Image (cartoon, rainbow, N blue to C red):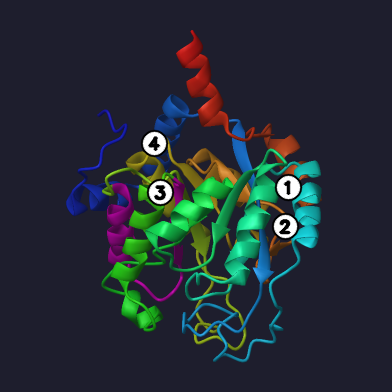
Amino acid sequence: MNTFNRNDWSVEEVQDIYHLPLLELIYRAATVHRKYNDTAEVQVCTLLSIKTGGCIEDCAYCPQAARYNTGVNIKALMAKDEVLDYARKAKEAGSTRFCMGAAWREVRDNRDFDRVLDMVKGVNSLGMEVCCTLGMLTEQQAEKLADAGLYAYNHNLDTSSEYYSEIITTRTYNDRLKTLDNVRNAGVTVCCGGIIGLGETHDDRIKMLHTLSTMPKHPESVPVNALVRVKGTPLENNPKVDIWDMIRMIATARILMPKTMVRLSAGRTEMSVAEQALCFLAGANSIFAGDKLLTTPNPSFEEDNIMFELLGLKAREAFKDEKDAAEINVS
């Protein structure tokens, strides 16, 4: 079956793929991955919290929500020079994409947004793919970010539309989808995935994957996150996500969206190298590197370099799709 660029998956088809016997699912996903991607190549991204804590939303998993007592200290928007220093260090350590996250409900047209636009220009000038996750934004704001050199915008769906209100009540699922439309219309690439371990069912995971894979254009990046259980959040006592559930999600995402970067995101600190290797085999080809994911722990650059050497992996170069397209046009 030719899966490339299909956007007409039915829920039943997604269900059938997701529920395949695990080894068969991994084999099929690995076959698709090998056909459409360089399986030795992994996109290395770094995520920095440029404005931390004090968020007015009630996302049940998030340590940055002001209403939860999680020990996260509120920090104002960082200075541009400090952010660029982090970006340079990330680039030196091997990252090719730099993502800046601010704990805002939505982007506001003010001095802080102007400062973020300046940061985007600065990171872009370093030759890195620059990504932001700033909450909801209008199409005009997305266009300003695009003009500043923004390459990608992250705005996760988190879960299915049916389960969403169990996790977040301060915005709607449609609010999320509207922001993604605004990003796409502005010509910025879309980074959109979700979190497993929120208390959702397998059907919720299937429905979220269905929503992602039936968008008019597949997201260029799909992060698959395992819940990081943070003391003080409503989900702090949820059970640890089973590695086989992560592999099942990654493999299904790979089959549904063959050319998408499927990112093995939050939760890697609780995975062995062998478990991460199975995720790469099942189709993951992107990670966050560096010891922090916003406010939660993550493996260090050194640990990841050792893992890459062991598994024979290499970092994907920045702007590879654009370079490949330019070469095709020249030839």
C-alpha separation, residue under disc 3 versus residue under disc 4: 24 Å
Towards the viewer: 8 or 145: 145
Identified at 60% across, 41% down, the residue is: 43
Q: Earlier in the sequence, mark 2 or mark 3?
A: 3
159, above or below 30, in the image: below
Q: Does the magenta stretch include residue 6?
A: no
Q: Is mark 2 on a helix, strand or loop?
A: loop
- In what element is the residue under mark 1? helix
The relative height of residue 43 versus residue 73 in the rendered view (above or below) is above
What residue is pinned by disc 3? 186
Q: On the picture, is 305 further left or further right than 68?
A: right
Return the disc, 1 or 4, that comes first in the chain's sequence. 4
> Nearer the observer, disc 2 or disc 3?
3
Percent across and percent down for residue 268 are 63, 58
The residue range painted magenta reads 188-213
The amino acid beneath tag 4 is Pro
Asked if one can make out residue 160 in the rendered structure from this viewpoint, the answer is yes
What residue sits right under mark 1 in the picture?
304
Residue at the disc numbered 4 = 258
Question: Residue shown at 46%/15% (left/top)?
Answer: 329
Image coordinates for residue 194, horizontal then vertical, percent: 43, 62
Amino acid type, callout 1: Asp
Sequence-first disc among 2 and 1: 2
